[in-house]
Amino acid sequence: MGGVLKIISHGPFTHSVSYSEDYDFYSISPVSTSDISAQVFSTSPVLMNGVKYAGLTSWSSGFNYSILDNGSNYRVNKLDIVLDVTYTMPKLALFCCSDNIETHFNTFYENLDLHEHGHGQILDDAKYEIFNYLIDTPAQNSKQALKNALNTRFDEVMQKFSDLSNQYDVDTRHGYTQGANI
């Protein structure tokens, strides 16, 4: 999937919020429908707290800004936010499998993809809240104080959405309630 770049006009300055999605696949070669689960969990690179998972949504985020210097106070002049989402997912190796295996795997994959995109949607829905929270950072008495305030606020707002993503996993039992089980 390609990225989306949204330009925001906030006063005379142009700001941007970019959101992109990408996939990172790992291949499996099951020999039967009952082998799909074993292949997924033996091959998956996703390991969290000692538990293997079939899929993962990871976020990479950051921001850049320029400063409006009024001599005694400093505030954000221009703000650019970058939010990148990567989905780590299984895929069938080329020419590996029978139609029956493909059908069984595809049903699982569609449900896993739905679940993982739920995580991505949390961040996509949050992008303007993140922007507004940062752009509303109060003026500071030094450039360093502004940098510290922005970093603190960015960490706070990203933690909020990370917590929502974690709760989403609790609510869906890591996708089980969405059919992402094999």
Image (cartoon, helix red, strand yellow):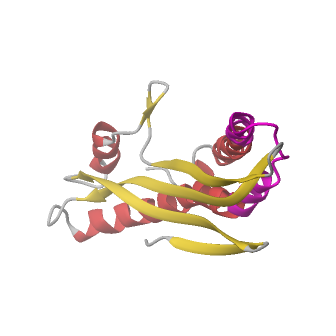
Position of residue 138 measured from the top left corner of the image (x, y, whole percent): 85, 46
The residue located at (47%, 63%) in the rendering is 21
Q: Based on the displayed image, in which of its 4 quarters is residue 8 positioned?
A: bottom right
Position of residue 19 measured from the top left corner of the image (x, y, whole percent): 55, 64
Position of residue 148 measured from the top left corner of the image (x, y, whole percent): 70, 34
Q: Based on the displayed image, in which of its 4 quarters is residue 149 positioned?
A: top right
Q: Is residue 179 shown to the viewer in this render? A: no
Is 112 displayed left or right of 7 in the figure? left
What secondary structure characterizes most of the magenta part?
helix
Between 175 and 159, which is closer to the camera in this rendering?
A: 159
> Considering only vertical position in the picture, is 22 above or below 55?
below
> Considering only vertical position in the picture, is 82 above or below 99?
above
Between 10 and 104, which is closer to the camera in this rendering?
A: 10
Magenta stretch, residue numbers: 127-153
Considering every residue shown, the one lying at the far left of the view is 95
The residue located at (65%, 46%) in the rendering is 165
Between 42 and 8, which is closer to the camera in this rendering?
A: 8
Is 31 displayed left or right of 14 in the figure? left
Position of residue 52 measured from the top left corner of the image (x, y, whole percent): 42, 34
> Considering only vertical position in the picture, is 4 above or below 57?
below
The residue located at (53%, 49%) in the rendering is 59
Question: Would you say residue 141 sits in the magenta stretch?
Answer: yes
Question: Would you say residue 94 sits in the magenta stretch?
Answer: no
Q: How many marks?
A: 0
The residue located at (36%, 63%) in the rendering is 104
Q: Is residue 55 shown to the viewer in this render? A: yes
